Amino acid sequence: MEWEGFEITRKNDSFLIEDNGFSVGINFKEDSDIKLLSSSKISSGEVIVGNEGLNPPGDFEPLNPNEIVDIFGVMIKGFEGNELSFWFKMGSTSFYYSSRPGDDKDIKWLESKVDVAFLKADEKSILEAVKIKPRMVVPYGGTETERDEFTAELEDRSFEVKNI
C-alpha cells in the first residue's frame, strides 16, 4: 500500500515501511536498513533495534523503554509493555507500532505525534487510537472479522483505517 510517498507492506503481524529505497522493518523477516524487534525473536538487518539483552547477528542497538535513539536520521523511541512498542520518525512522518493495546503508559507523550499507527485489532486499541489521534490506523492481529469490526468502529469515529 502506498501512503503519502511511503510504501507500507504487511506480512502477518509485521510491517516494512519504505521511503526512496530506505526501509524500516517492524518484526519483518526480510532485510531492511533498520530492523525494530518488539520481542526477543532474533532477526537480521543492517542495524537491529530491540530490548537490551538480545544478541542478534550484526550491528545491534539496544533500546530501553523511554530512550530515544537516532539511527540514519530516523528518531526511534521505545515504550515498555509485554513486548517493546516503537514510535519512529522518518523525515516529517511519524509511525507508532503498539504491542500493548490500551496501555495508558506514555499515551500523553504520543498524543498528536503519530501519523500512522499500527494497532492490534481489539477493543483496547480503540481507546488507544482515540487518545493518540493518529492520521491513519493500520490494524494487525486477530481474525479478518475482528479486523473488519475494529475498522468499522474506528471509521465510525472518523479515523482513516487501511487494512493491508
Image: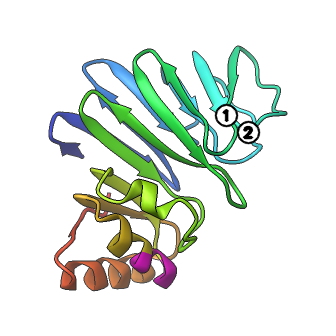
Which residue does the image show at 73% across and 39% down from the upper left?
51
Amino acid found under the numbered disc labelled 1: Leu
In the rendered image of this protein, does residue 45 appear above or below residue 125?
Answer: above
Q: Name the colour scheme.
A: rainbow
Is residue 54 visible in this depiction of the protein? yes
On the rendered structure, is 132 left or right of 53? left
Prevailing secondary structure of the magenta residues: helix
- In depth, the one of 136 and 134 nearer the eye is 134
User: Which range of residues does the magenta coloring cover?
Assistant: 122-127
Name the mark on residue 10. none
Q: Earlier in the sequence, mark 1 or mark 2?
A: 2
- In depth, the one of 119 and 91 nearer the eye is 91
- In depth, the one of 58 and 127 nearer the eye is 127
| Residue occupied by mark 2 | 51
- Which quadrant, please, contains the C terminus? bottom left
Please give the count of numbered marks on the rendered protein: 2
In the rendered image of this protein, does residue 72 appear above or below residue 39?
Answer: above
| Residue occupied by mark 1 | 63
Residue 56 part of the magenta segment: no
